[in-house]
Image (tube, helix red, strand yellow):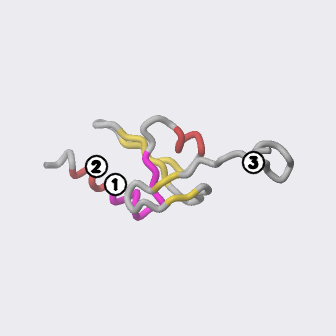
Amino acid sequence: KGNKNRSGGPAVIDTIYRCELCGMESEKPTRWIVIHCSDAQLTVHKWTKEAADAKGARHYCGEAHAQVYISRWFESFCE
């Protein structure tokens, strides 16, 4: 038996993404933001599955939460 989707094939389990700041979870994170960063570089991406699934990607449920992380990242270099 097992889980089947509407077309009769095996059910696909979507990836659940979690906001790094508030913990909100979503299988369909529209309008979310992905950040890739290292000690020397921070890159902000509009949500794509490729960006979200990249190694070390950080996920944020919106611009405000992404901005908090960006501000903290800059502050870490100004101490």
Local crowd at mark 2 within 10 Å, few (<14), some, or many (≥20)?
Answer: some
* Badge 2 vs badge 1, beta-carbon distance below 8 Å: yes
In the displayed structure, does residue 2 sit left or right of residue 13? right
Q: Nearer the viewer, residue 51 or 1?
A: 1
| Vertical placement of residue 22 versus 50, above or below | below
Amino acid type, mark 1: Tyr
Residue visible at 64% across and 48% down in the picture: 14
* Mark nearer the N terminus (3 vs 2): 3
Q: Secondary structure at mark 1?
A: helix
Q: Amino acid at mark 2?
A: Trp
Name the residue tied to disc 2.
73
Q: Helix or strand or loop: what does disc 3 sit on?
A: loop
Vertical placement of residue 65 versus 73, above or below: below
- The answer to whether residue 23 is magenta is no
Q: On screen, 77 above or below 20?
A: above
**Crowding near pointer 3: few (<14 within 10 Å), some, many (20+)?**
few
